[in-house]
């Protein structure tokens, strides 16, 4: 019987936990077991940010990295070897408020106060990151830091004011966060082998049937996965966490990717960027944007910063949601997946990975080891677009990506078009691609490809959008790509607000907002 305990740094000391279920969330443990109720419970799905905490872990260089995450969907065993910081940590021993808290008070940035602890922790993560970088955050950095926190009362102006003012206050001893001391406390908590944890089940029985495994090497991870093909692979919990908090599912054995250094590696050579399956989304998008700056908006609008800090690109690909925002861009960039079972690997184009709704080509015991994205060719014209009812932190109605290799003669040598939200899986548009490939990139070609999209997809109607709206938006996004990438007077992104054609039945559609007129 497994007897290893969960060890993490909390309130300045090593905290040890034994008798909790494998899927006990950090939020549940804080509020119900430790009675540390400053961290609030809101949506229980990572949307509202009331439960925001900050996790500290040692990076590959042994330095402390701080990330704001949602405690409501993070399972407690994932804290092993890490540090947990909550709003209770901000106050000084003499009761003085942290500059983050004082700024929130002085800027009148709180009314009912329910959301305020989550805002304070997101701002504290920003405060410590900017102090380490010796700079002040720009307005868009503040907006990104707060993208996962919702306030129903105050409005965001005074909260943003507080984010700007918090750097003006004199730092008291608690604000002078001692990174070196934290790093020294965390090092002895790093386990040399696989961490195994089994606690009581969710109903309080002495021991549950599930075990949490956290290997530290790729070889150990692969061996565990091959030996337990039915175990649940867990990365950032941003999807799997909801299976527990909303669907009350029993996960069985869990194998955690977050401690495997090889799965968190990013490498770049002349041919490709290789992203380990456990690289957090925030880091993965940052690396992708170096080669493909056109991804900047999609990166900023992919969920919220706490979700991107926890969720992984490999997890997003493996889950295969038809509305997963990463996949259309990866599909048109001809991404490949490195798949592994035990000590054998194979490479599969992402376009061949999905076999049906949330079904894929993984064999039993196989897992995604890495995603390889080719480096951009000089002839590539690449665009991505996300259409949702809110700008921040919303699920797409339609997500589109276009990659066109266009020669000096203006002819499209290779065209790749993909959409999310238009089919049971993220899917390439074969007929539209056929219309584009070999043709001159001009208005007539764009119109023919738009018509071909009707044959490529039969979208569904749901509460996010009607089928007719999705079909029309898909056409107009291809037109938008044409407007932005044509040789003659291409339009900048900010210049393209509405789409449609004079004299045609296609009416102009505003692509931000609730354009669905069902």
Image: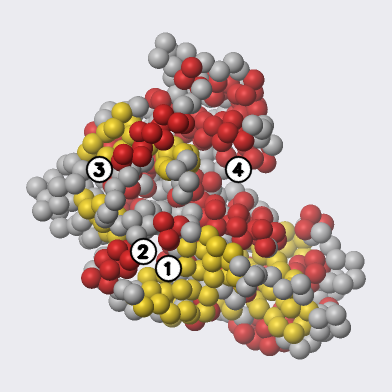
The single residue placed furthest to the top in the displayed view is 94
Foreground disc of the pair 2, 3? 2
Which element carries disc 3, helix, strand or loop? Answer: strand
Q: Residue at x 44, y 17 (%)?
A: 92
Which residue was labeled with disc 3?
A: 6
**Residue 256, image quadrant:** bottom left
Asked whether the residues under the numbered discs 2 and 1 touch, taking CB atoms below 8 Å apart as contact, a structural biologist would say yes
* Residues at marks 2 and 4, CA–CA distance in whole angstroms: 33 Å
Q: Is residue 236 above or below residue 455?
A: above
Task: Look at discs 1 and 4 and give the one toward the viewer.
Answer: 1
Point out the tag, 2 or 3, that comes first from the N-terminus.
3
Q: Which residue is mark 1?
A: 369
What's the CA distance linking mark 1 and mark 4?
29 Å
The residue tagged 4 is 144
Q: Which mark is residue 218?
A: 2
Disc 2 vs disc 4: which is toward the camera? 2
Q: Which label was assigned to residue 503?
A: none
How packed mark 2 is, by other alpha carbons closer than 10 Å (few <14, some 14-19, many 20 or more), is some
């Amino acid at each position: 019987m497994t007897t290893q305990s969960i060890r993490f740094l909390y309130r300045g000391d090593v905290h040890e936990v034994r008798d909790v279920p494998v899927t006990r969330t950090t939020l549940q443990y804080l509020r119900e077991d430790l009675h540390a109720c400053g961290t609030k419970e809101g949506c229980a799905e990572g949307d509202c940010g009331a439960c925001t905490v900050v996790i500290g872990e040692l990076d590959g260089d042994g330095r402390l990295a701080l990330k704001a995450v949602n405690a409501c969907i993070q399972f407690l065993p994932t804290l092993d070897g890490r540090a947990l910081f909550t709003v209770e940590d901000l106050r000084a021993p003499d009761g003085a408020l942290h500059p983050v808290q004082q700024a929130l008070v002085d800027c009148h940035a709180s009314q009912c106060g329910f959301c305020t602890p989550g805002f304070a922790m997101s701002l504290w993560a920003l405060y410590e990151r900017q102090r380490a970088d010796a700079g002040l955050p720009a307005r868009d950095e503040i907006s990104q830091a707060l993208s996962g926190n919702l306030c129903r009362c105050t409005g965001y102006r005074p909260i943003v004011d507080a984010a700007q003012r918090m750097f003006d206050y004199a730092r008291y001893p608690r604000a002078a966060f001692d990174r070196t001391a934290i790093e020294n406390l965390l090092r002895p908590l790093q386990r040399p082998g696989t961490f195994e944890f089994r606690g009581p089940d969710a109903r309080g029985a002495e021991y549950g049937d599930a075990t949490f495994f956290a290997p530290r090497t790729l070889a150990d991870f692969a061996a565990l996965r091959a030996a337990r093909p039915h175990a649940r692979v867990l990365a950032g919990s941003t999807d799997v966490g909801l299976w527990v908090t909303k669907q009350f599912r029993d996960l069985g054995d869990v194998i955690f990717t977050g401690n495997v250094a090889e799965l968190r590696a990013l490498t770049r050579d002349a041919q490709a960027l290789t992203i380990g399956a456990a690289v957090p989304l925030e880091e993965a998008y940052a690396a992708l944007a170096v080669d493909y700056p056109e991804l900047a908006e999609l990166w900023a609008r992919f969920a919220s910063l706490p979700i991107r800090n926890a969720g992984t690109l490999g997890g997003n690909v493996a889950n295969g949601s038809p509305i997963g925002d990463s996949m259309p861009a990866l599909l048109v960039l001809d991404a490949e997946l490195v798949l592994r079972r035990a000590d054998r690997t194979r490479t599969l184009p992402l376009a061949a990975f999905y076999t049906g709704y949330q079904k894929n080509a993984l064999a039993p015991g196989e897992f995604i080891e890495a995603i390889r994205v080719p480096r951009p060719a000089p002839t590539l014209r690449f665009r991505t677009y996300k259409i949702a009812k809110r700008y921040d932190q919303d699920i797409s109605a339609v997500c589109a990506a276009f990659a066109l290799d266009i020669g000096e003669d203006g002819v499209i040598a290779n065209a790749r078009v993909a959409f999310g939200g238009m089919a049971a899986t993220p899917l390439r548009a074969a007929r539209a691609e056929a219309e584009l490939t070999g043709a001159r990139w001009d208005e007539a070609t764009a119109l023919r490809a738009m018509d071909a999209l009707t044959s490529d997809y039969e979208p569904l109607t749901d509460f996010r959008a009607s089928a007719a709206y999705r079909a029309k938006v898909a056409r107009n996004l291809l037109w938008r790509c044409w407007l932005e990438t044509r040789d003659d007077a291409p339009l900048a992104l900010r210049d393209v607000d509405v789409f449609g054609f004079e004299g045609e039945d296609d009416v102009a559609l505003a692509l931000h907002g609730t354009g669905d007129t069902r």
